[in-house]
Every structure is written in structure tokens, then in C-alpha cells.
Amino acid sequence: MVRWPSETGTAGEAEFAPKLVELLRRIPYFQANPDDIAVIDSHGSPMTQNVVAVVRGRGRKALAFAGHYDVVETGNYRDLKHLAFEPDALLEALLADLTSRTLAPNEAKALSDFQTGDFIPGRGMLDMKSGVAAGIAVLEHFATKQDREGNLLLFVTPDEERGSRGMRSLRDALPSLMRRWNLDIVAGVNLDATSDQGNGSEGRAIYRGTIGKQLPFAFVVGKPSHAGYPFEGISAHLIASEIMRAVEANADLSDTEGNEVSPPPICLEARDFRGGYEVTTPERTWIAFNWLAHSRSPDALFQHFQSIVSDALHRAIGHFNAHAQTYAKLLGTEQSASDHEGRVMTVAELRAEVVRIGGDAALKRIEELEQKLSVHDNPLLLTRELVDRMVVEARITGPTVIIGFGSLVYPHVHMGNEAALEREFSAALDAARLTIEQRFSTTIKYRDTFAGISDMSFFGYKPDAADSQVVSENTPALQFIDQVSPDALTYPVVNIGPWGREYHQRLERVYAPYAFDTLPRFLNEIAENIFGRSS
């Protein structure tokens, strides 16, 4: 599978699903039961597809494994780009390269890893076709059992690396498919990979949840002024810088779950909208933050962000007005610029103002702009241009700050122990863990939160309706609003996948003994514990 290029957003991604179906149909079970493979359209042009395969046993109970097949682009391979999807040839080329020159520390470690024979390189080898391979291996083994209890499902989806459109489209199609196949999903295992720079003790893990990701933005509208008369306006950059000071890398804004602490928010983009040189202060600027969450809901985070922005806005204005008074005293005049007052608006409030001022015609112009900009794969570009147009349509003057979500919101999820399905799944996981630890003289640890952004945010999970409403009302780009079907299936999910080092990088590599031996046996043990032993 690694030899099938499937870079996100390319024709290779669209070509992967038919190849995977052909591979699955080499398995005797699927030769005899071709209808137990379903192909479900996802997105794009050419169309990408989700592949769902089931190996049936007795009863309706089903356990689902899930992995994605798209990978990030291969530009960082430089001169070895043509070998990025050829693990054997790539390993030979990397060994030749790494033994011929002075190495950086990470390169020296990679060389040592490769020389053991236990690590295999390649784009997608770690993230995450080895996880998909483990899922296929378990299905194939399950199909050889003559007296099977339960049913095993495998979901293989595109687009995890960009917007999880594969998993989200599959989620929407699953209720109908499960009714047609007469199955009830009781639990799921996401097969995403873990990076471990040590001996694998951190990578051999059961993750009870995944981190959430949000991209809140502040679009600042100032009041322009000529450089010779600065206090006739107020700088959008001054306001933005005060917001930046309040948010950037502020550890007090880190979220927690159990013993784990999320990284603090960090700015991904800060820019104004000026296209050329003027001796006038910029009217509009914007900043967007990456904010990770272990437990805080989108609604709670948005309210917190609104409070931070409001305080920062008023601090900036207060400082500026004080400077105006000081300058007036230096001039020896009673006259000073009038005090500025600011406001914070949400995207929902901005949209309402667009409708009030421009009506349906203004909304149509904004929709047409979104369609025009949808060819770009940068969510921040699309969002800031849409908000800029909305500000113009609504005739917003400064000082004003508009806040909203700049891209798709990835919910944080966490499997508890309250519901019966959660308790049953937890018991099956723990029994399997103990068996594998004893059999392989190893350790497998529990971890609260998978640190990577993943499909796990949408796998077996339906967000709270209030959170969904806040997100949808305050996301300018319609394509970044996750419309969840009311009949979406819910079930407990954990992440158990391979481990390796430097995924998405030139030296991406998977630790083969765990990925191709221990992991599939562990997954099989989980299935055995859920369904009961079968011959």
C-alpha cells in the first residue's frame, strides 16, 4: 500500500480506494462474499472514496477498526522524492546518504535505527498505512475462524490530513449501511500512529481520547489616520498586538485532562490587508490562533476567547487614549483627539448586520466569493477574505474586532467508564493488554489523550448540539461547518496504532516488530475478548 502514492488532494488519493478493494478481494472470504465490501463516495474531483469491509460472524455485534490512506506531500524528500513510496529502495538510498556525511542528531539516530533492521522508511509507512495493514491482517485472520462470534469492520478513509472529509462522509453514511448489513457497532479502534523517540514504551499505548483543535481568529477593524495626525484614528495593529500579547503561548490558557496538559495557543497567521505603500495606518488586520483542547468545549473556549479579546481591545484603546492626552500636553493645547470606544462582534452578529444592510443580495455575493476561493487549500486565506468582504458589506467601522472560527473545529473526545458499552470495551481492552504484555514480555500503557489531530474526533462521536450551533453560527466558510446527521451512530472509541519516528518528515519510519506482529495480535485479542473465544 505504501507503494501507492496517495498524497492528499491529488489523483493518487482518488486512485487508492479501487486498488484497496482489489487487494481485499484477494482474501478468500471476500472472494466468496463480494457484497461485504462497500465503497462510499467522499469528496473531491476526481472523487475520493471510503472503503468499508466486514467479515461476518454470528449476531449483530460489530467492532470497527479505522484508518486513513491519504498522506502529506513528499517535497521534503528533496533528491529522493522519486523513492518516497518505495520502502526498499528508499532504505538503501538513505543508508548510502547517511553514511557519507556528517549528520545532525536526528539523522544519526535514524541511521542507527535503520542499521538495526527494525525500522522501515517511506511516506505513509508510519502515518498511516501500517495501521491500515494491521486492520486488514486482523480481518483476514478473523475470516479463517470456522465458528465466528460477532462481526469485524474496517473503515479506510481519505482526507484525514486536511479536513477529515472521508471520516465525516462515512459517519453520515454509516447508519444506512449498518441497517442494510444488520449490524450494531459496539466499539471502535482508530489505528493512527504514535511518534516515540525513546524505546517504544510511549508508543505502545491505548489512547482513551484525542485532542481537540480550534482556530479562533480576531479580525481587527481600526480607524485609519495619516501618520502626521496619529490620534485622529487608532491603529488596527495596536489592537491586534494587544490581543497577541494576551494569547500567544500563554500557559494559563492551556487545557487539562487528568494528568495531561495541552500546549498553549499559538499564532498561525498575522497580517494586514494593505496591498501597497501609504502614509496611512492600515484599517484592517487579522490574527488566527491554533488552540488545542483536552476538555474545554468549543462553546466555552469561544466565550473565553471573546472575553480575552474584549479585555485586550479596551486595554489597547486605554493606552492609546492616554498617549493622546500626553501628546496634547506636550503641545500645550487643551485639544486632544476624542476618546475611542471599541466593540467585539461575533461572526453571527456580523452576518446579521450583513443581512440588515445588504439583504439577500449581499449574502449571495459572499457565497459567490466562497465558491471562487474554494480552489485554495488554505482555510485561513478563505476565512479572512470572506470576513473582509462581510466587513465591507456590513459597513463596519472601527475600532471593532470580529471573532469566529477560522477552519473546521476538531472536537476533543474521551472514552469514559459510565455507559455499559464503555465498561464492556474497557474490560476487553484491559484483558487483551495483560495477555499481550505477558506473551511478548512488553508493556502497553494507557494514555488519556492522543496528541495529533485525527479522524478520532469524528469516529463514533456526535458533538453536543449547543457546541454545534455555536460553531456553525460563527464559522464564516460554510465548507468548514461539520453538519452532523441527527441519526449519527455513537459508540466508545480508543486509538491503538503503530509507533515510529518523524512522521511527515524525510526520515519517517515505522518500528516493524510492533506494527506487523505485536499490534495485529493485540487487535485480534481485543476482538476475541469482545465477542468471546471462537475456534
Image (tube, rainbow, N blue to C red):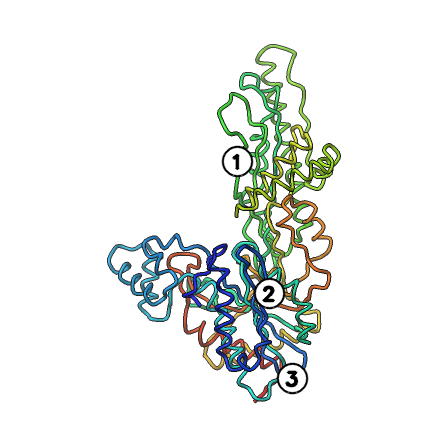
Give the x, y percent position of residue 37.
57, 73
Q: Tell me, yes or no, if residue 314 can be seen here.
A: no
Give the x, y percent position of residue 286.
57, 36
Q: Nearer the viewer, residue 273 or 528?
A: 273
Residue hosting label 3: 58
| Closer mark to the observer between disc 2 and disc 3 | 2
Q: Nearer the viewer, residue 529 or 201?
A: 529
Residue hosting label 1: 271
- Residue drawn at 72 percent across, 35 percent down: 353
State the separation of the CA atoms marked 3 and 1: 59 Å
Residue kind at label 1, given as amino acid type: Arg
Query: How many residues crowd around disc 1 within 10 Å: few (fewer than 14), some, or many (20 or more)?
Result: some
Location of the C terminus (image quadrant): bottom right
Q: Nearer the viewer, residue 198 or 383?
A: 383
Residue kind at label 2, given as amino acid type: Ile
Most distant residue in the right direction = 356
Where residue 390 sits, quadrant-wise, is: top right
Give the x, y percent position of residue 481.
65, 51
Does residue 27 lie above or below 146 as drawn? Answer: above
At numbered mark 2, what does the secondary structure look like: helix, strand or loop? strand
Most distant residue in the top direction = 332
State the separation of the CA atoms marked 2 and 3: 25 Å
Residue hosting label 2: 40
Q: Which mark is residue 447?
A: none
Tags 2 and 3 touching, CB below 8 Å: no
At numbered mark 1, what does the secondary structure look like: helix, strand or loop? strand
At numbered mark 3, what does the secondary structure look like: helix, strand or loop? strand
Query: How many residues crowd around disc 2 within 10 Å: few (fewer than 14), some, or many (20 or more)?
Result: some
The numbered mark, 3 or 1, whose residue comes first in the sequence reads 3
Where residue 221 sits, quadrant-wise, is: top right
195 sits to left or right of 291: left
